[in-house]
Image (spheres, grey):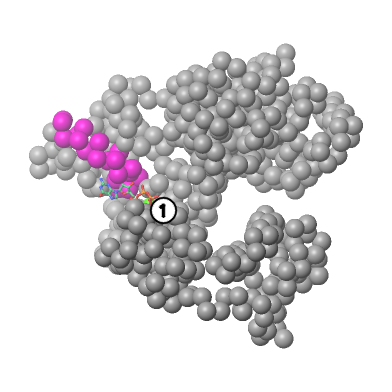
Amino acid sequence: MEDKRLPNTEVIAILKEILAAMEVKDVSFFRIRAYQNAISVLENLTVSIYDLWENNRLGEIPGIGPGIEGYLNELFTSGEEGEYEHIRKDLPEGMFSLIGLRGIGAKRAYKLALAFDLNDRETALEKLKQFAQKGKIRDLEGFGEKMEIAILEAIEDKKMTKNKKVRFLLPQAEEITQRIYDYMRKSKHVIDLEACGSLRRRNATIGDLDIPVSTNEPEKVIEYFLKFPEIGEVLVAGDKRASVVLTNEVQVDIRVSTPEAYGSMLQYFTGSKQHNILLRNYALSKGLSLSEYGIKKGDELKEFADEEDFYKELGISYIPPELRHGNYEIEAAQKGTLPKLIELKDIKGDIHFHTNFSDGINTLEEMVEEAKNLGYEYIGVADHSPSIQSRGLGTVLKIVSDTRKRIDEINESQDDIKVLYGYEVNILVDNTLSLPDDILKNLDYVIAGIHTAYGQDKNTVTERLLSAMENPYVKVIAHPSGRLLNQRDPADPDWNKIFSSARDNEIILEINSQPDRLDLPDDLVKSAIEWGVDLIINSDAHSISEFGFMKYGVDNARRGWAQKDDIVNTLSYEKFVKKLRLM
Ligand code: DGT
Ligand code: CA
Ligand code: CA
């Protein structure tokens, strides 16, 4: 019999359906509890459940009893019908589409599906919505009018999240853009092209690509673009523009322009939409009207080959794309008070990276070598701290003194780069740190961060961060909001309290450059700067190549109006170690 290899997410989804069936059928509380525990153990596995099963190693995992092992045997070998099929028998299939709606557990889902004959997963939600709209749910026993309204809302919300398109992270968008550039530049008719929109503004996530092309042969360029091998579907094909969806689901909008008007086209398609609207209003007040073709005064259109001249014509400073949010930048450009934004070349060091001591790939020596190649003056290793619980205090102290020796040796063996020694420690739910002060005091610095229980309420998460900032050995708070783009919302502490405490305790807040973090988010970068908080841009590299993520952190800082002086790792080594209170 052929085995059925399934990804962990699917295995867990199926196990949860069995759990729901158990709840409906009033299986004993203890069995349900054991089963729930097993699911949460499996949810936290980072290895493939199927692989474990295939190698007969499921039994080794604490919490996985013979019951769940039996289900998995059934699931991974086709053809057998046993307990797993049995328990779901005579349940209306539609109930499984309802579980997970706000306020709807297994039993309610079952009641609803039974009452309205929801036997099809595909249509269950839509049908339930119609029954809710007709006021039919309130009459069911145990539901009522409030519940009916809540269900309707939940269905509508869920629809929205379902239809919400994934937004791409910067490196993904850049990779696709590069392939389009490589292809387009092979055409002799393409004079210039540049991806604009959110990518050029260096937004943390990218919806679609907007690419103006400079050419004297618009039709030929469009025709050529439509032959790009990765195109999945053509949405629009005009003589000056085309919109397509690539096979990887990215939408690309191409607009052609003569070289004489290319600057205006760049300006228009860089946006943001709000920036363009405000700029247009500002221009109107001066009797000018703006479009992608140029600036019109009366009937006379002035074209711009160069984008900088477009802003100059309006009598304001050039606004870097990262600042074009449509809030304060136009006023600042009028007054000439735009910031001189930090640049990648200003960065002199990076003090948050991992080695193969924790979850990194390279050795400390390899990371140091790469940092030298990048021209850094100093770096600091900040592996996840070793656990006292599993290793014991003595062993951890030994690790610290051995590592210190190793770092001293590196520092003594060369003069190109200074290496500092820190750890990334966890801020635990009880507001303590994952290492005691007796260990922390031996380090050059401590980066503290939240790594568990993100969904805490405002006060709790605020207190948790504040208590870490009061520890004298903590110098940096890692990825302060904890957001993971497309996956986890930022935590919601009282930021004003965080910023004022950071300033008073001389705590540096991190701008983490991992493309799925970019944390602090840009708007909070701006607030932190206004509060006078020191910021540091770190790569959080887990391999030599990830040192290169630094540029995304710099972009994010630029979007938050950061200047060189706002970022402490632009300082020379001597000044930097003073910031860390090492001298
Ligand atoms: P995205 O794609 O969701 O990440 O965000 P953007 O900013 O790239 O937005 P997109 O692709 O809809 O449009 C690209 C640019 O084109 C936008 O930033 C400004 C310009 N644009 C688009 N639609 C309008 C509009 O209705 N009015 C104005 N003034 N500009 C627009
Ligand atoms: Ca776009
Ligand atoms: Ca677009």
Q: Main secondary structure of the magenta part?
A: helix
Q: Which of 182 and 215 is in front in this view?
A: 182
Judged from the image, the secondary structure of the residue bearing numbered disc 1 is loop
Relative to 411, say whether 158 is above or below. Answer: below
Relative to 39, say whether 234 is above or below. Answer: below
Q: Does the residue labelled 1 lie within 8 Å of ligand 1?
A: yes
Question: In the image, is residue 274 part of the stretch drawn in magenta?
Answer: yes
**Quadrant of the image for the C terminus?**
top right
Q: Nearer the viewer, residue 152 or 79?
A: 152
Percent position (x, y) of residue 508? 59, 24
Q: Nearer the viewer, residue 397 or 510?
A: 397
- Figure disc tally: 1
The outermost residue toward the top is: 583
Indicate left or right for 485 with 31 as reference: left
Relative to 499, say whether 157 is above or below. Answer: below
**Quadrant of the image for the N terminus?**
bottom right
Percent position (x, y) of residue 19? 60, 65
Question: In the image, is residue 201 part of the stretch drawn in magenta?
Answer: no
Q: In which quarter of the image is residue 544?
A: top right
- Looking at the rendered structure, the kind of residue marked 1 is Gly
Q: In which quarter of the image is residue 138?
A: bottom left
Identify which residue is drawn at 76% across, 43% down. 358
Q: What stretch is highlighted in magenta?
A: 265-286
Identify which residue is drawn at 51% across, 75% down. 91
Identify which residue is drawn at 65% across, 64% down. 28
Percent position (x, y) of residue 158? 41, 58
Q: Name the residue under label 1.
A: 207
Residue 190 is at least partly visible in this image? no
The outermost residue toward the front is: 141
Indicate left or right for 532 with 30 as reference: left
Identify which residue is drawn at 69% across, 77% down. 74
Residue 265 is at least partly visible in this image? yes
